Image (cartoon, rainbow, N blue to C red):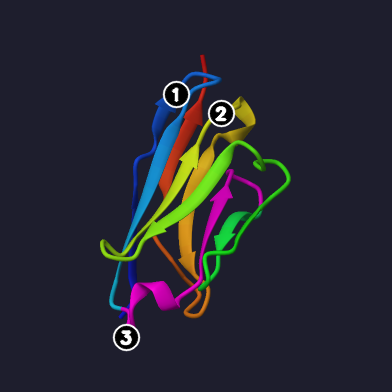
Amino acid sequence: QVQLVESGGGLVQPGGSLRLSCAASGFTYAFSRYAMKWYRQVPGKEREWVASISIGDFKDYADSVKGRFTISRDNVKNTLYLQMNSLKPQDTAVYYCQAPLFGTFGQGTQVTVSS
């Protein structure tokens, strides 16, 4: 059973940085063989795609975070990351990682950007 556990969220001032982690387990094959995604959700709104990383490490980003966020992975640690720089109040949300092949989301980690 695939399990995803996000961590690293918190309260940060505008312009600050955070790095989110997503610890993955339960995959049949090596973690490197699975595409992964980050999403975020604000209460009352639909979940929004943030970033993707493919099997070949091709990376793609939503326009709202392009140039500020970086998705990466450590295939030895089976961990997905999201480095978030130059954070803005509108980045405030619960952030989730997903393994698209399974449609599985983690429990999420809260990111709050506020002065």
> Which quadrant holds the N terminus?
bottom left
Q: Is 52 colored magenta in this rendering?
A: no
Q: Decide which of 45, 34 is in the foreground and name it.
A: 34
Query: Percent position (x, y) of residue 80?
Result: 40, 57
State which region is magenta. Answer: 27-45
Disc 3 to disc 2, C-alpha distance: 36 Å
Q: Is residue 91 left or right of residue 30?
A: right
For label 1, count other residues whose C-alpha is less than 10 Å away and answer few (under 14), some (14-19) or many (20+).
some
Disc 1 to disc 3, C-alpha distance: 37 Å
Disc 1 to disc 2, C-alpha distance: 8 Å
Q: Is residue 15 left or right of residue 74?
A: right
Q: Secondary structure at mark 1?
A: strand
Query: Percent position (x, y) of residue 30?
Result: 33, 78
Q: Earlier in the sequence, mark 3 or mark 2?
A: 3
Dot 1 amino acid type: Val
Q: Earlier in the sequence, mark 1 or mark 2?
A: 1
Contact, mark 1 vs mark 2 (Cβ under 8 Å): yes
Residue drawn at x 46%, y 28% is: 17
Labels in figure, total:
3
| Quadrant in the rendering for residue 25 | bottom left
Identify the residue position indicated by label 3 in the image. 28
Dot 2 amino acid type: Leu
Identify the residue position indicated by label 2 in the image. 87
Identify the residue position indicated by label 1 in the image. 12
Query: Percent position (x, y) of residue 60?
Result: 64, 57
